[in-house]
Image: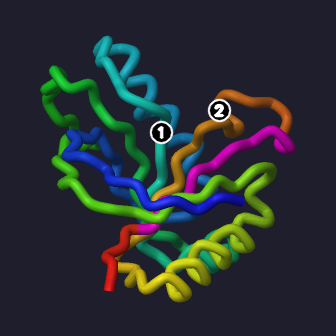
Amino acid sequence: MEIQEKHIPDNKLAIINYKGPIEDMDVLLAKLMGWIEEEEITVEGQPFIIYYSPRHEVGNGEDVVYDVGIVLGEDEDPDKTELIRIVDLFEHNVLAGIHKGPTDSIMDTYEKIVNYATSNSYDIIGSPTEVLIKSKYNEDNKDNYITEIRVPIIKI
């Protein structure tokens, strides 16, 4: 797996903040994407998840703190709703790696990214993001899932 440093530019996001079971993510993403479609909003890229709870605790039956979101098109400026917030994400750098296949083994990919960071003088400074490039929302076969993991960093 190739790990690369990426620069993420300033973006406007539509997000849903949530604390609860990870299984609720399906409903949250459906609401977010339904709102995008209903309001005819232009987006850039695929939906993502930002985990504020430790990623290794996700799926252990505990409540998880996370956002589901998507990057809005450059000219979009929609109004927030009771559930969906519109926020600015400031430019930053990340280490990014691609996880292929089911998310059951995603912690192995996280471990490779963390090891790369420590071995190459990077400091991890924020919550990880998982961009759902191919997932159950647009792919039937779990073996074909593709998730880009982004870990915010600074060079030390």
The picture places residue 154, in percent across and down from the top left corner, at 31, 76
Residue type, label 2: Tyr
Who's the residue at 55% across and 49% down the image?
Answer: 25
Q: Which residue is mark 1?
A: 47
Mark 1 or mark 2, earlier in chain: 1
Colouring used for the render: rainbow
Residue contact between numbered discs 1 and 2, judged by CB atoms under 8 Å: yes
The picture places residue 126, in percent across and down from the top left corner, at 35, 74
Query: Is residue 150 shown in magenta?
Result: yes
Give above or below for 71 relative to 50. Answer: above
Q: Secondary structure at mark 2?
A: loop
Who's the residue at 44% across and 23% down the image?
Answer: 34
Q: Residues within 10 Å of mark 1 (few under 14, many from 20)?
A: many
Who's the residue at 51% across and 70% down the image?
Answer: 64
Q: Secondary structure at mark 1?
A: strand
Q: Quadrant of residue 107?
A: bottom right
Task: Report the span colored magenta.
Answer: 142-151
Q: Which residue is mark 2?
A: 137
Give above or below for 147 relative to 84. Answer: below
Who's the residue at 74% across and 73% down the image?
Answer: 108
